[in-house]
Amino acid sequence: MINSKFHRVAKGVCMGLLAITSVSSYAIENGQHDYMHRNVGGIGFDIDGPANPIPPFGLCSGFVISDRAFVTAAHCIITPPPFASWAVTLEPGTPENPVIQPGIFTGTNVSDFPMLVETIDAIAVHLHPDFDPGSMTLDVAVLEFPPGTFKVRPVRLAEQYYLDELDIQGVLNLRPVGLVGYGAQALTNEGYVMPGYRSRGFSKASGITDDQLFLTPTDVFDARSMPGDSGSPQFISGRAVSLTSTGDYQRLDIPEVLDFLAPFIE
């Protein structure tokens, strides 16, 4: 049986409980409401277990790679308390019906953003074995679920060294890069505006290293990363080529990542 948890928002609960000083996660500025990417979801961490009333707190994004596996950024997993469990929703939300409580994110007020919809609880969490929290190298993790949990078509991962091939062909910076996530859309004097629903936009690639993709928005393709949703995928020609790390983008098309993800796809 798939465990799920539906919560009503409990105002004022857990204030001061979380000692999180920084959430280095990102989402989409200049994005539009997205209802197309049914295989991209939001994740939250749960501090009291599925049977109890406190809702998961929305933290990051990620994407489905099989009927039982959901990929996100590893640094999202190490941010909350170590006893936290994890839950996912694929609901897109709308401006009128958000999936995460809207508000202003100041950098430390994660408990102000409970998830407002039914979520599905992960049964296991797997960090990339070579993830380095200092350098953010191999910033990839998998949330595991019972087989058959996800009914949507999985995200198509880019083939090995796909970005290198585009770079060699001289077309890497000519292809629009799609961004999809659940996080902030603007910065104000008070903090980052978190709308609480999934959005999408486009940017342009400006270069790659052995494990990172770099994006530079243009006047036309002006989406950019913002605090709120690490783990969100970036697409080129329908392939997931990277995920949002802490400022730049962790490549998914390198052997170290593809080999890590392979057992969850087979």
Image: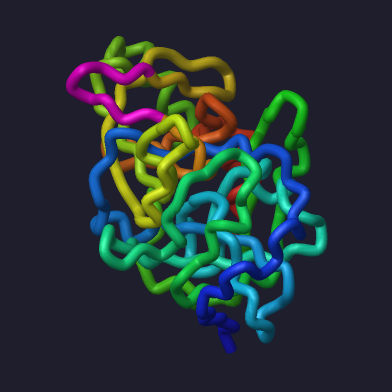
**Residue 157 appears in the rendering:** no
The x, y position of residue 256, in whole percent, is: 64, 35
Q: In the drawing, does residue 177 fall left or right of residue 45?
A: left
Q: Residue at x 61, y 35 (%)?
A: 24
Please tell me which residue lies in front, 166 or 118: 118
Q: Is residue 92 shown above or below 261?
A: below
The x, y position of residue 242, in whole percent, is: 47, 35
Q: In the drawing, does residue 213 fall left or right of residue 76?
A: left
Q: Quadrant of the C terminus?
A: bottom right
Which residue is at the far bottom?
Answer: 1
> Which corner quadrant of the image does residue 96 belong to?
bottom left
Callout count: 0
**Residue 205 appears in the rendering:** yes
Q: In the drawing, does residue 111 fall left or right of residue 66?
A: right
Please tell me which residue lies in front, 168 or 38: 38
Range of residues picked out in magenta: 216-224
Provide the major secondary structure of the magenta segment.
loop
Q: Is residue 222 shown above or below 81?
A: above
> Which corner quadrant of the image does residue 147 belong to?
bottom right
Which residue is at the far left?
Answer: 220
Q: Residue at x 66, y 80 (%)?
A: 50
Q: Residue at x 42, y 24 (%)?
A: 163
Q: Quadrant of the N terminus?
A: bottom right
The x, y position of residue 209, in whole percent, is: 54, 15
Q: Residue at x 42, y 47 (%)?
A: 194
